[in-house]
Image (cartoon, rainbow, N blue to C red):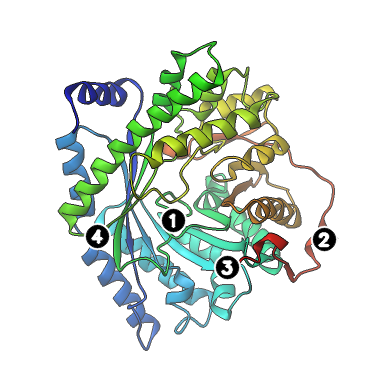
Amino acid sequence: MINMNEVFETNKMIHEMNLDVRTITMGISLLDCTGSSLEEVGDNIYKKITTKAKDLVKTGEEIEHEFGVPIVNKRISVTPIALVGGSVCNSEDDFVYLAQVLDKAAKEVGVNFIGGYSALVSKGMTKADELLIRSLPKALSKTEIVCSSVNVGSTKTGINMDAVKLIGEKIIETAEATKEKDSFGNAKFVVFCNAPDDNPFMAGAFHGVTEPDVVINVGVSGPGVVKRAIEKVRGKDFEELCEVIKKTAFKITRVGQLVAKEASKRLNVPFGIIDLSLAPTPAVGDSVGEILEEIGLEYAGAPGTTAALAMLNDQVKKGGVMASSYVGGLSGAFIPVSEDQRMIDAVAAGALTMEKLEAMTCVCSVGLDMIAVPGDTKATTISGLIADEMALGMINQKTTAVRIIPVIGKGVGEIAEFGGLLGYAPIMPVNRFSCDAFIKRGGRIPAPIHSFKN
């Protein structure tokens, strides 16, 4: 039972500490949207999305109003389009057509983003997979709210280096295609190792093939709540600190559970998972960087940062799993540079480098996220950064990701402006030494020895 003290406490978290439900994401399977022609498949996709999600935004707004809980985004994820369009897409332009269908359908139902312009290629690429990847520059520049992801590695299969090489090239081309908007196209694209099937957060959301026909996944977020809570234990030992984080994560997750169950009931759609990630925004007081500073660091990136982040991530998960039977997605702490004001400040102060961020990704929920780099960065360098991050995920049996944005026409120290939740980012330097010969080897890096469990 929820008592009045908990109601007052939740109300305070919402109004004073930036607690929100970051997203209600409706996952929709498109596996039944087959047809004999590209146009028929496109029509089937459009009809299914606009039918299943027609009440999603309205329902989210009603819950927001009735419960007083801000729901920042309403989103859709769909079956990876490389699977759906494989039988009818014979060119890059065919896949771009389906991307535009997704864009049109998502705008029709009024959601913020639609994810699933995706391919799963950790062991190899089909013709359809390769065409979709090659279509990315056009697809991301010709649509507005379509998000894309490619899973290029897993602990079970290794890393598909042919895909990593190709994606590095396409990231550069996407940057060029969207250079009028500070190469914004790449803010809608992420590369994964061990991608989860039920992630509600963009740009990596897609509806996995093991999921039901339609499902509701909810992502909650409360960096400000955690930061305010741990202010009360300044100078205390780690046992007390960890207890406070766990209890706070529990309360945050209960809010998400309430919203998820209510949305599921009203939409008559199964409840999938709660993703209890601490996802920051550019707003003051809504920062993972601030949490790390409150734990005892001058800036994110100072010695001790990786240990502090590991502890934070673990305690968030421990608290959250007690609050819901169905915790999934990514769940933990996100460290995007552009979306977190104190992370931006840490980069500007010289405390946070690319190498330190990479170390931090070993213990957080995602990876190198929303990082702007010079526009003249080579495609092979981008591929090398992706390969490094994929290796961390593969060996550590965790999800890792890369969302990196080479900003055409800008260099180190300049600022890339993305707007809204995506914020802005200082251009970070990258290691300029070559990895060309390594990337050009091609093939697949084998799975690690500990993957052979059966």
**Cα distance between the residues tagged 1 and 2:** 30 Å
Q: Is residue 279 visible?
A: no
Reading the chain from its start, which is encountered first: label 1 or label 4? 4
**Cα distance between the residues tagged 1 and 4:** 16 Å
Res. 53 mark: 4
Residue at image coords 53%, 31%: 312
Q: Dot 2 corresponds to which residue?
A: 438
Reading the chain from its start, which is encountered first: label 3 or label 4? 4
Q: Is residue 441 visible?
A: yes
Q: Dot 1 corresponds to which residue?
A: 205
Q: Secondary structure at mark 4?
A: loop
Q: Give the quadrant of residue 191.
A: bottom right
Amino acid beneath label 4 = Ala
**Cα distance between the residues tagged 2 and 4:** 45 Å
Reading the chain from its start, which is encountered first: label 1 or label 2? 1
**Cα distance between the residues tagged 3 and 2:** 21 Å
